[in-house]
Amino acid sequence: MPIKYTENSKWNIMGMPPILFLSFSIVVIVAAYLDQLPNTLFGGLAFCAVMGYAMKFVVEHVSILKKTIGLAAVSFSCAILVYFHFIPESTVKIVGNVITGNCDFLSFYVGALLCGSIIGMDRKLLVKAGVRYFIPVLGGMIFAYTASAFVGSLLGYSWKDVVLYITGPIMGGGNGAGAVPMSEIYAAASGEASDAIYSRLLPAVTLGNWTAIFAAIGVRCIGEKFPKLSGNGSLMQGYTAEQSNTVYPYTMQLLDLGIGFFATAAFFIFGRIAGMLVPTIHAYAFTIIAVATVKIAGILPEKIEFCIVKWYQFISGNFTVLIMAGVGISMFNLATLLETLSPIFVVLCIVTVFMAVLGAGIFGLLVKFFFVESSITAGLCMCNAGGNGDIMVLSAANLMDLMSFAQISSRLGGAIILVLQSVLATALL
């Protein structure tokens, strides 16, 4: 007798009957605990599907979680399970290999979101928003640097140490694209070993990222409480979320996904080549520039644009929850976070993130952006841990369609911070 299946049942998990999801999950979990989980995309993504969709089911059926932390609970719960060693170490390594290691599925996912979200935007909106976007980014930087230095001085910290070792690392684009090159910049200016400097920068990056995620939840709730502050997914005032996107007169065929994948891969690889030639700027930034230029110029046939957008929707719709679980398992280190929790340090990190939100939101209003979307993309996505931080912040705020703007903050904004920190390091160290 076949298993009873009701397609739109609220009790379905990952679109399938609970008994079927549970049966498949038992196979994966048993393999993990018997150390038989394949160290491949199959093994890593299957385990992420089990953890991610199980927690998503809980969030959807527990009202307080759904209205507050939302899907950010997926990563938090996975990080907690890793911290208490409920997930086998071998499985953690497999997931790490899939998400950011040799498989690097995180880049695969982010590349689809970058290209598809930009290509699918309304061309007029892209031009209007793109040229104005750095205004709220600048606003967040001004507010964060000024306020954190001032509060640090009041609390007995040297303002120089605050901007060099707290504010700069938090807003510098994460770990690999931020803290690592920043430590080398400081080392060149001071003569101190870069690894010693890096150990001073990493706690701020870690705590700033966690603070940004919780702040995203708070800003989302503010938007729900005061609807006029939010565009419900649209960055610019005067555009609804639907008006922000191009409408294509095509019906999707399976072959379209292959075309979309290949075009996305070409844009992504172009970013890598350009990043090799100009290593001070992250490859993602060049991908964004290339895709935006092609979209504004109208070079691609509409059908190819449609394929790229459908590929993005396919990846986003099927793998966002898996990525959130994978990031929580392999990249959220609760132990490192707990080591940084001295009261003054926490206060200064919170001040930095809060003022970045406020500055980006206020300056965003000046250029006709919605406060919520502007403060999250131009503010919080300057304060998180780069690519995986963008995913967590946007998922917590339910704004994944704004990934392209988030990456502008993380990558181009992070590059601006590195230039600023190099000037400060030369003057202050």
Image (cartoon, helix red, strand yellow):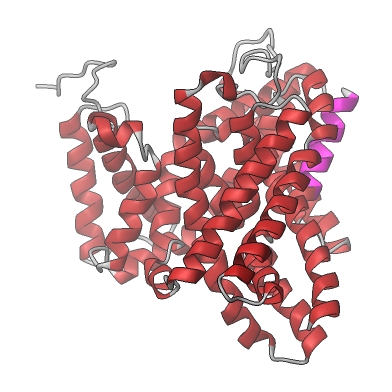
Image quadrant where residue 13 sits? top left
- For image coordinates 24% across by 21% down, the residue present is 10
Chief secondary structure of the magenta portion: helix
- For image coordinates 68% across by 41% down, the residue present is 360
Q: Is residue 352 left or right of residue 395?
A: right
Question: Residue lying furthest top in this view?
Answer: 249
- For image coordinates 61% across by 63% down, the residue present is 151
Number of marks present in the image shown: 0
Residue span colored magenta: 286-297
Image quarter of the N terminus: top left
Q: Nearer the viewer, residue 375 or 127?
A: 375
Q: Is residue 228 left or right of residue 418?
A: left
Q: Is residue 404 visible?
A: no
Measured as percent of width and height from the top left, residue 263 is found at 73, 36
Measured as percent of width and height from the top left, residue 89 is found at 32, 71
Question: Residue lying furthest left in this view?
Answer: 1
Q: Is residue 62 left or right of residue 173?
A: left
Q: Nearer the viewer, residue 101 or 293?
A: 293
Measured as percent of width and height from the top left, residue 96 is found at 45, 63
Image quadrant where residue 153 sits? bottom right
- Residue 291 in the magenta stretch? The answer is yes
Image quarter of the C terminus: bottom right
Q: Is residue 28 above or below residue 348?
A: above
Q: Nearer the viewer, residue 382 or 254?
A: 382
